[in-house]
Amino acid sequence: MTIRGRSGAVAVAVALTILTLLAPSGASAKPLQPWWFTGLSVASAHEQSTGKGVRIAVIDGALNRDVPELKGAKVKLRSALRSDSLKLAKARSYSSAFYASHGTAMTTLLVGQGKGNAPGGAGITGMAPDAEVYFYQKDPDPTDQQSEWAGQLFREAVKDKVDIISYSYTGSLDLDEDIKKAQDAGIVVVAGAGNPNGPVGEPANLPGVVAVGVLDKKIRPWKKQPEGNITIVAPGVDIASGAMKGTATDARWVSGIERTGTSDATPLVAGALALVKSKYPHATGNQLIQQLIHSVGGRDFGYTQEGGFGVISLEELLARDPAGWPDENPLLKGPNSAFSTYPQSVWKDPSAPTPTPTPAGSADQAAADQSTNAAAQDEPSSALPWIIGAAALVVLLIVAAAVVRRRRTASPALTGTTGGTSDGTQ
């Protein structure tokens, strides 16, 4: 049917208005469910854990704290670097700065609450929506070039006693000591491996750091995967999260815009580890990393440079207690050492009864002591067994003589016991 003229246009507008009003009110609250969310079965994982009680440090450029996905999320603005001195400033929110796009997207992938400004009010639900994010800002001026000297912010995260650091940057300088301090404090450092077709860069290439690579929609390592040692791969191609759109100083947040790169895979891995830490709060940072490399989907324990130890699997990660692994960072000496030193068999069920240690006075020890004592005894004492044996022989001879005398007088019906035949005869 074709409607012409102004009256027709009015009719169409009225019809659309009516359809909008008649739409179910619950539809506006339905969150976006992009491929990474459904592919990793995040909704099912949230039935077991949502990250509650876990602190995640996000060290990034800047943050728009006012986006709808972060309404109700536990996000704390912490420290910011200052370009004019070595002192730190208080981080703040930038609601209209284009520069806040990256940091806001990373935070949304972690703790997004599912409500945005996409059609129907839909938005992104993060990997660990009930976790607590501590945001550390690399530059207080979003129009300036970002600072690569992020070591102070890592030190601040250690002071704040976070559980996990999510760092979607590469090329940062002189982070060796600061990351080691974080690891010594029991913090898991998760970092993006690097830019497309480039080398795995710092800090992802530092000892003990979880270097995150990209998985595409066909569940394959990214064709543009950075070259070097990858720890784990997670969705990172066409990742719906959101972005700031507009000019440098006049931009607005748009929910659900897709992004691609190791940056976007990084918070998904950090959030997954937060789910594990929330479910098993007694697990150490080292044990979380052990769990990560041993609990992948679709293959046995193994390693390839482009695919790391495998594809992240929330189901496998949440299936067993990480406390069964050794409290040692398996990545400190590189992936090959991790593969050979920590096979799957090193996990021991922490709920299984612990074998009772053998007491010092056990039977084995007593036997050993007896043997030692016997060798040290003097000659008269060592003859004691022979004396006892002789006495026993005399007793046996007396009993035998008594039996013989009794048989001579007993009737045949009473015979047929030991030594007799079946008919009772001798």
Image (cartoon, rainbow, N blue to C red):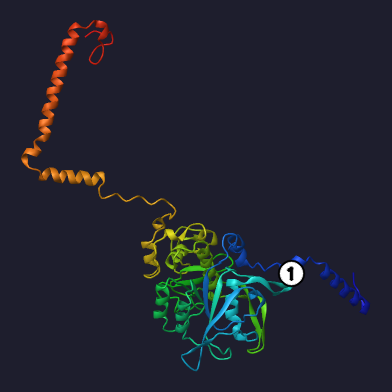
Give how far across and how far down residue 19 sits, in percent: 84, 69
Q: Residues within 10 Å of mark 1 (few under 14, many from 20)?
A: some
**Which of the 4 image quarters holds residue 331?**
bottom left
Q: In this view, does 134 lie above or below 249?
A: above
- Residue 297 visible (yes or no): no
Q: Mark 1 points at which residue?
A: 28
- Residue 186 visible (yes or no): yes
Residue 301 appears left or right of 423:
right
Give the number of marks.
Answer: 1
Front residue of 282/227: it is: 282
Q: Residue at x 39, y 73 (%)?
A: 184
Give how far across and how far down residue 128 sits, in percent: 57, 68
Callout 1: SS: helix
Looking at the rendered structure, the kind of residue marked 1 is Ser
Q: Which residue is drawn at 60% across and 77% down?
A: 105
Residue 17 appears left or right of 302:
right
Q: In this view, does 159 lie above or below 398?
A: below
Q: Check the image and name the residue furthest to the bottom.
A: 84
Give how far across and how far down residue 307 sits, in percent: 48, 67
Q: Which residue is drawn at 58% across and 65% down?
A: 50
For the C terminus, the quadrant is: top left
Q: Is residue 121 above or below residue 41?
A: below
For the N terminus, the quadrant is: bottom right
Give how far across and how far down residue 107 sits, in percent: 58, 76
**Which of the 4 image quarters holds residue 206?**
bottom left
Residue 44 appears left or right of 318:
right
Front residue of 13/53: it is: 53
Q: Check the image and name the residue furthest to the left.
A: 379
